[in-house]
Amino acid sequence: MLKGISPLLSPELLKVLCEMGHSDTIVIADGNFPAQSIGKNGIVLRMDGHGVPEILEAILEVFPLDQYVEKPVSLMDRVPGDMADVSIWKTYDDIISKYEVRGTQVIGKLERFAFYEEAKRAYAVVATGETSQYANVILQKGCVLDKR
């Protein structure tokens, strides 16, 4: 255990977050996401007993979002005509606004298959047990700014 770091951040996940460089991406995937096939060229971390919001919050406590791009957070957009409940997006708005000075301006949406293509290029995929549909998130890492 470490002081000040969420116990949700396992040693493996902390290692991945530290290894990632500026502009690398990480996917936090819901339980329906094809994590193993999408992440076959990267690292797949299983966190099946947890939901996306709690993992998102734990990561954003230590993870800088890319300050040089307009939308360093991507959500999988709903397929046209699909009436799936996406109320989880409001939860994401609240979490992201808590850790990002630009607030919800940093959130973009990608069409389902465009999201899959972006996810294939991710450094890592975190597979959760989240049951909400369209709960997938891609985060693009930024730089820790020197505050000396």
Image (cartoon, helix red, strand yellow):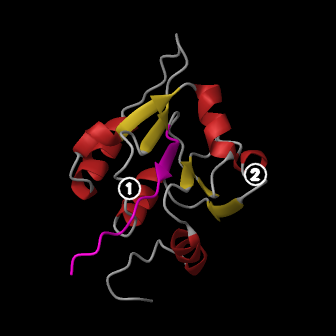
Secondary structure under tag 2 reads helix
9 relative to 61 in the view: left or right = right
Please identify the quarter of the rendering in which residue 128 is found.
bottom right
Q: Position of residue 15 (x, y in %)?
A: 57, 77
**Is residue 139 located in the magenta-colored stretch of the structure?**
yes
Q: Where does the magenta region start and end?
A: 135-148
The CA span between labels 2 and 1 is 25 Å
The amino acid marked with disc number 2 is Gln
Q: Earlier in the sequence, mark 2 or mark 1?
A: 2
Position of residue 110 in the picture relative to residue 39 (left or right): left
Amino acid type shown at disc 1: Leu
Q: Is residue 134 placed above or below 72 in the rendered structure?
A: above
Badge 2: few (under 14), some or many (20 or more) residues near its Cα, within 10 Å? Answer: some
Nearer-the-camera pick, 139 or 45:
139
Q: Which mark is residue 29?
A: none
Say above or below: 1 vs 6: below
The image position of residue 68, as x and y in percent, is 37, 49
